[in-house]
Image: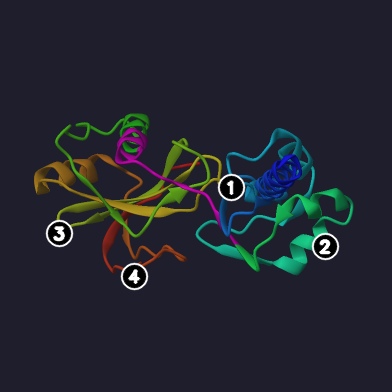
């Protein structure tokens, strides 16, 4: 009887050990978002990963992060090659066949856009200021590599046909986002008032290359602010 009990206890202990062994193996995530320029193995770890594994994984660089709005694929063999200097991790990690890495980004808010335009109008000393009721529409997608970046207005187009102003806006630090377009509808008298007081506004085509849906608009007043 004692022998039978002992055998049961040993069997249970063996099962517990095997279960604990399985629990100690961390499976890498099959998709990950990165915000920094360099991808590290720690970017692939789930939140509950033990600190010791995470600290070691943080030291392992796997390559450059993808560009904004793009992805990069790592195959299992590539990740294993990255572990050459830390073979002890091979027994602690379960590596999927492939890991998809996306560049993490944050949407640029309408609040940030309104502030950039208001600051721009105040700097140019245009009167009157944009009304609080002005609504803005993004022409295409806009996102940045950091949350709530500072923005600058690059140039302004006045569409007399639609009574709209179109602003070309970018991040103050160009590495955080590219140029995107924003439009706002204004009363014709309001827009014409700006046109009359801006000596730098000229007649001519507006061509902004590299922008989604951008076309040349003949005879449209365009303002390029001085640098």
Of 63 and 28, the residue lying toward us: 28
Give how far apart the Cα atoms at labels 3 and 4 are: 15 Å
> Dot 1 lies on which element?
loop
Residue at 82% in and 55% down? 83
Q: Which mark is residue 175?
A: 1
Pick whichever of labels 1 and 4 is earlier in the sequence.
1
Give how far apart the Cα atoms at labels 2 and 1 are: 31 Å
Pick whichever of labels 3 and 4 is earlier in the sequence.
3
Where does the magenta region start and end? 100-116
Give how far apart the Cα atoms at labels 1 and 3 are: 33 Å
Give how far apart the Cα atoms at labels 2 and 4 are: 47 Å
Pick whichever of labels 1 and 3 is earlier in the sequence.
3
Question: Residue beneath label 4, please?
Answer: 215
Residue at 59% in and 54% down? 29
Question: Residue beneath label 3, please?
Answer: 162
Q: Position of residue 177 (x, y in %)?
A: 50, 49
Pick whichever of labels 3 and 2 is earlier in the sequence.
2
Q: How is the image coloured?
A: rainbow
Contact check, label 3 and label 2, Cβ < 8 Å = no
């Amino acid at each position: 009887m004692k022998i039978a009990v002992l055998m049961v206890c040993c069997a249970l202990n063996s099962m517990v050990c095997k279960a604990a062994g399985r629990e100690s193996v961390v499976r890498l995530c099959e998709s990950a978002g990165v915000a920094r320029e360099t991808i590290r193995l720690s970017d692939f770890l789930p939140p509950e990963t033990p600190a010791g594994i995470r600290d070691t994984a943080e030291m392992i660089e796997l390559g450059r992060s993808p560009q904004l709005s793009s992805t990069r694929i790592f195959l299992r063999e590539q990740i294993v090659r990255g572990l050459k200097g830390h073979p002890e991790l091979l027994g602690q990690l379960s590596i999927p066949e492939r890991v998809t890495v996306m560049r993490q980004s944050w949407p640029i808010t309408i609040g940030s856009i309104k502030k950039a335009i208001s600051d721009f109008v105040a700097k140019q000393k245009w009167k009157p200021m944009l009304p609080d009721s002005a609504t803005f529409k993004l022409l295409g997608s806009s996102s940045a590599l950091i949350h709530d970046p500072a923005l600058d207005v690059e140039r302004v187009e006045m569409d007399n046909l639609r009574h709209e102003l179109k602003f070309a806006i970018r991040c103050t630090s160009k590495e955080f986002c590219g140029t995107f377009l924003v439009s706002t509808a204004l009363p014709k008298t309001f827009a014409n008032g700006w046109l009359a007081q801006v000596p730098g506004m000229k007649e001519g085509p507006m061509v902004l290359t590299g922008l989604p849906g951008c076309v040349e608009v003949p005879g449209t007043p365009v303002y390029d602010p001085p640098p």
